[in-house]
Image (cartoon, coloured by chain):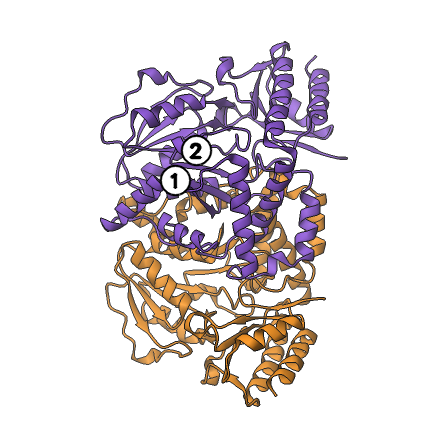
Chain colours: A purple, B orange
Amino acid sequence: MKKHFFTPGPSQLFPTISKHIKNAINYNIPSISHRSQQFKQIFEKTVDSLKKLLNIPDNYQVFFIASATEAMERIIENCVERYSFHFVNGAFSKKFFEIALNLKNKPLKYEMDYGKGFNFNTVVIPKKIELICFTHNETSTGVALNVNDIYKFGKLYPDKLIAVDIVSSVPYVNLNYSLLDIVFFSVQKGFGLPAGLGVLIVGPQALEKSKYLARKNLYIGSYHSFIELSNYAKKNQTPETPNVFTIYLLEKVINDMLKIGIKNIRKNTDTKAKLLYKFLDNNESFKPFVKEKPIRSNTVITGELKNGSENIIKKLKSKGFVVGSGYGIYKDRHIRIANFPALSIKSVKGLIKQLSRLSI
Amino acid sequence: MKKHFFTPGPSQLFPTISKHIKNAINYNIPSISHRSQQFKQIFEKTVDSLKKLLNIPDNYQVFFIASATEAMERIIENCVERYSFHFVNGAFSKKFFEIALNLKNKPLKYEMDYGKGFNFNTVVIPKKIELICFTHNETSTGVALNVNDIYKFGKLYPDKLIAVDIVSSVPYVNLNYSLLDIVFFSVQKGFGLPAGLGVLIVGPQALEKSKYLARKNLYIGSYHSFIELSNYAKKNQTPETPNVFTIYLLEKVINDMLKIGIKNIRKNTDTKAKLLYKFLDNNESFKPFVKEKPIRSNTVITGELKNGSENIIKKLKSKGFVVGSGYGIYKDRHIRIANFPALSIKSVKGLIKQLSRLSI
């Protein structure tokens, strides 16, 4: 039976992936040296295509690492001497804060309950803060921030760096990168690729901060310091042997997306999200978990079930529709539905049909 | 034209890989959740098979990370408060030392020229040293240490931890893991897999050291501290979304190797190495770079060319045989030939035939 992966972790593979994997094997991509001209060309093409797709400024660099979790660690190591500030409203924004704690820094946080947004107007960021961290789309709950709220902090605090996690909203979220310093994601969600590759987009101020910390002889990590990553990226390489295979596949999927057009991908995501929220809003047995419509994510849609989610998740699976359970304490109360570009309108309609049957 | 990758970086894929990749896609492996029962089973099976293949004690844990370079960083973070000792005789043993420097520790080293071994009997490890680091097989030069020399340090210094890099000698090297504390490798060499996965084998004393540093409130990293990796590994999981696809493939290749038998794989490696060294020893235009026969690697065979290697590497490539260039300053003077299990005796004979023609 054909399966539809609506899971917000690893998710549905992009429809063209099988073909690209077959080609990669035929062209011996996993065997080529990461110091070869052929690899450098793949690196360069991937970065160029990504910049084109997401409209990333020329003077921003793209670093390939292993995961979004690694991105959080490297950002704290390279951009913070002591104080970062975190907007926490779910498991992943909390993880970013905790990583700063693990690294023996002194992070501060503004914490809201799961499923809630922030009252940004009341927040004053202390003077000592070096980096402000946002999770644009909380994968654990399905809350998406308004990007304009994020930009405001950049304007209000021009001396502080701004980092944004777009793990589960890329490539849907349309960002003005020039107002941000560090943006990161992993490829197994919106790009529909196998997991094992993280992408860090780093602006000049963030790189400067890393160099400043290095000059002060402070710890910025080793092979994956921004300085090392930047020096190698200038040569279209990575410090270590990277996940060459997935970098190759990423470039292929980005090019497929460029052919479809990013506007169409975003419009399509909106259409599918509308269908899903319409269903949830008009259903008796489960409701959208995020009550405030303006902060409902269009890429991770969370439903709360009166009678628990375990059974319905099992039944959906038996029909070929795999959705995510709730996160943490919500495990058995929520279902989370990923609405990534790899999932077609037809699949979404199929899921809604099954959900209607099961929830009556 | 069929290519034979004798490169000691990413290398020839194991012959069964195409089949396993096809199955992985058919079974939706890249889409499954890294928190699912299905993933936990893959994790457990991979660890169990690896322990069987390499004869790793039950009380040692296996951690999946992103690369061998990451392994070096995590080992220093988790096992050293200040002082590690490094046997340096090439680019990768040097990298391990430099990572300790980057992490603001105070590493010491015993350094020999490239291509040389160590006079182990004259070495006295200072009392303050916490960790002794060996690179079993220097990929940059083709020097392999005698494992008995490594074991001696464990016996002489029972209070110190021993870490061994087997990046380019696994699974050929036959280790007594119970005499070692940390062993690591990546999968794109001896296992013939795509790059992007590192494996850390950690014994109880190393984990204890990490816990001791944590109790002292010292820095041991964040999501990839030994403590985090250990806690997740106990649940057959990883802290972050890992490279699920390659973990799956690793398990499949290990099982193929178990069917062939590790003894046969080692015997086969010896046979192929003998053929290659015999050719080099009896050839006028290029000679083995490593002069002392007892420390010549059987898995990375380095030849030094009187008239430079660039031309011959190009010509070999045009015949379908891809070999490595020299490392660093030896780039244009050496060729490095990987002798990994994925390469058959027939391929090795084919390479030697081409080499004979080109070097006359």
Residue A208's place in the image compared with B274, above or below, is above
Write the residue at 39% across / 47% down.
B225
Res A77 seen here? no
Quadrant location of the N terminus of chain A in the rendered image: top right
Write the residue at 46% across / 81% down.
B290
Compared across the picture, whether A123 is left or right of B290 comes to left
Kind of residue indicated by mark 1: Gly
Q: Percent position (x, y) of residue B120?
A: 35, 78
The residue closer to the viewer here, B199 or A274, is A274
Kind of residue indicated by mark 2: Tyr
SS category of the residue bearing label 1? loop
Name the chain under label 2: A
The residue closer to the viewer here, A304 or B197, is B197
Residue B4's place in the image compared with B195, above or below, is below
SS category of the residue bearing label 2? helix
- Residue A177 shows which numbered tag? 2
Quadrant location of the C terminus of chain A in the rendered image: top right
Instruction: Determine crowd level at label 2: few under 14, some 14-19, many 20+ residues with C-alpha closer than 10 A.
Output: some
Write the residue at 27% across / 50% down.
A214
Q: Are marks 2 and 1 on the same chain?
A: yes
Name the chain under label 1: A
Residue A103, located in which quarter of the rendered image? top left
Residue identified by numbered label 1: A203
Q: Percent position (x, y) of residue B187?
A: 55, 58
Write the residue at 48% across / 78% down.
B333
